[in-house]
Image (spheres, rainbow, N blue to C red):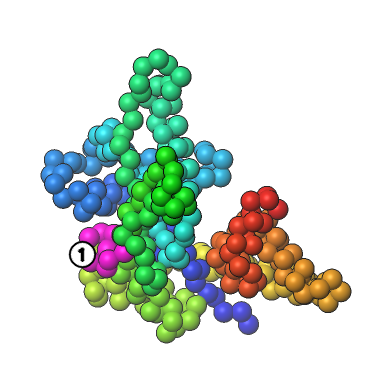
Amino acid sequence: MMQTVTRRNSKDSVFVRLFQDKKNVLKLYKDLHPEATGITEDDIQIETLQSMMVNGLYNDLGFLVRDQYILLVEAQSAWNPNMPIRMLIYLAETYKKYLQDTRQSPHRSWRVHLPRPELYVVYSGSQKVPDMISLRNDFFDGNSDADLKIRILYAADQTIYGQYVRFCQIFDENRHQYGNRLQCAKFTVEQALEEGCLSEFLLKHRSEVITMMEQLFDEEAARAAFLEDEKQHQFKEGEAKGRAEGILKIAINMLQAGIFTKESIVIATGLPMETINELAAQGV
């Protein structure tokens, strides 16, 4: 009998749900800008990119504050060194939408108005990470006219993003202890409440959060079944064509399926990230 399992990025789903509420977005902004005492919920406009609107693109959280600042925030439990590129795409698409919404054109002879960008990653993994990453430094060894900087938020503290980081740590602790069972989701919520972590949100949405995790179980099981089927099929072919070719085919099929992260493909196949990036660049 197959056990129900929790999806590894269920924490990220909690992040997205947490910041659907403008009250929590306001808390986030004030945590990042404690000097902004006069900002209210009415000053905030959520601008998260939706996949059905922007050619398959989706980011975790984007919001506009008084038409002056645009903040883009991503939640990551596995470190992604490509965040400067992803943020560059998010920012370009967000500005494109902003210009359309405000009926401005970059082709006119006068300068358009743009809100100032601030870019953040909320990182909840265990890897040691820098406080900031940069397009210029991380991709071009400091030798580029173009740059984009992202601040990394990883401390488990009393800020709303810090409470989310702690929620993720609790999740991982329970996942290690209880495995991938549904029990993990329930214990995560209960322990977070005991520690006063995201209490208001979890008390209000406890059943919804647990149900949201439950709905992801079948998807995780389907992914595991897909991977196992692909392994069996490709390794049989690999007996004739060579094991290396079979593993490469698995990676290609996983990329084409569109439901696996590059990190999960690396883990499943043992291929280096460089090879996976090359395959993705080829559009396989």
> For the magenta stretch, what is the residue range?
154-164
Q: Position of residue 154 (x, y in %)?
A: 31, 64
Location of residue 10 with respect to 149 vertically, above or below: below
- Which secondary structure, mark 1? loop
Nearest the viewer among 147 and 32 is 147
Which residue occupies 68% across, 50% down?
Answer: 282
Which residue occupies 56% across, 40% down?
Answer: 55
In the picture, residue 242 is in which quadrant? bottom right
Q: Position of residue 142 (x, y in %)?
A: 41, 50
Whether residue 218 appears in this view of the structure is no
In the picture, residue 260 is in which quadrant? bottom right
Specify whether residue 159 is painted magenta: yes
Location of residue 20 with respect to 2 vertically, above or below: above
Location of residue 195 with respect to 133 vertically, above or below: below
Q: Position of residue 1 (x, y in %)?
A: 63, 82
Nearest the viewer among 8 and 278 is 278
Label 1: how many residues lie within 10 Å, few (<14), some (14-19) or many (20+)? some
Q: What residue is pinned by disc 1?
A: 158
Which residue occupies 56% across, 61% down?
Answer: 261
